[in-house]
Amino acid sequence: EKANFVREEELNKCTRKLSQNGNLSDKEMEAVERLSRGIVNKLLHGPMSHLRSSDNTQDQQNAIKELSAMFRLEDDDQSRGGRRGRKSRR
């Protein structure tokens, strides 16, 4: 869910910038969207496979906690509405 949220945010930024330089065709926009979905799917494949590989519930719960900490999933759930207090990296 977070990965898709980030993908959509970045896709929106990218399409705004690209549309300022000239109009993209519907076919080109779809290609950019497919590219973004493909990147997210490939990035998530490893962690999701790892979670599914264990039959031990405790191992799965530990992996979920580790992934949640690595990707700051709980922190992000609280700040979905905006970038509260975060500085831009530009």
Image (cartoon, grey):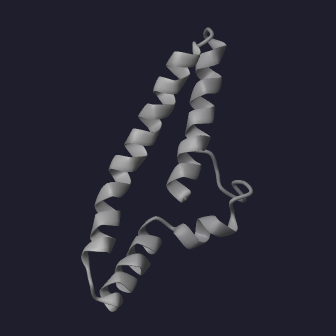
Q: Taking 20 as reference, is 2 left or right?
A: left
Give whichever of 69, 90 is nearer the camera.
69
Q: Is residue 87 above or below residue 66?
A: above
Q: Is residue 49 above or below residue 24?
A: below
Instruction: Answer yes or no: is residue 90 visible.
Output: no
Q: What residue sits 45% from the left and 41% below the top?
A: 37
Q: What residue sits 55% from the left and 59% below the top?
A: 1
Q: Is residue 23 above or below residue 60?
A: above
Instruction: Name the quarter where the C terminus is drawn.
Output: top right
Q: Taking 62 as reference, is 72 left or right?
A: right
Where residue 79 sits, quadrant-wise, is: bottom right
Where residue 74 sits, quadrant-wise, is: bottom right
Q: Taking 20 as reference, is 60 left or right?
A: left
Q: Taking 68 as reference, is 57 left or right?
A: left
Residue 20 percent coordinates (x, y): 66, 15
Q: What residue sits 61% from the left and 64% below the top?
A: 76
Q: What residue sits 59% from the left and 51% below the top?
A: 5
Instruction: Answer yes or no: is residue 4 visible.
Output: yes
Residue 10 percent coordinates (x, y): 56, 39
Where residue 85 sits, quadrant-wise, is: bottom right
Residue 8 percent coordinates (x, y): 59, 42
Q: Is residue 57 above or below residue 84?
A: below
Residue 58 percent coordinates (x, y): 34, 91
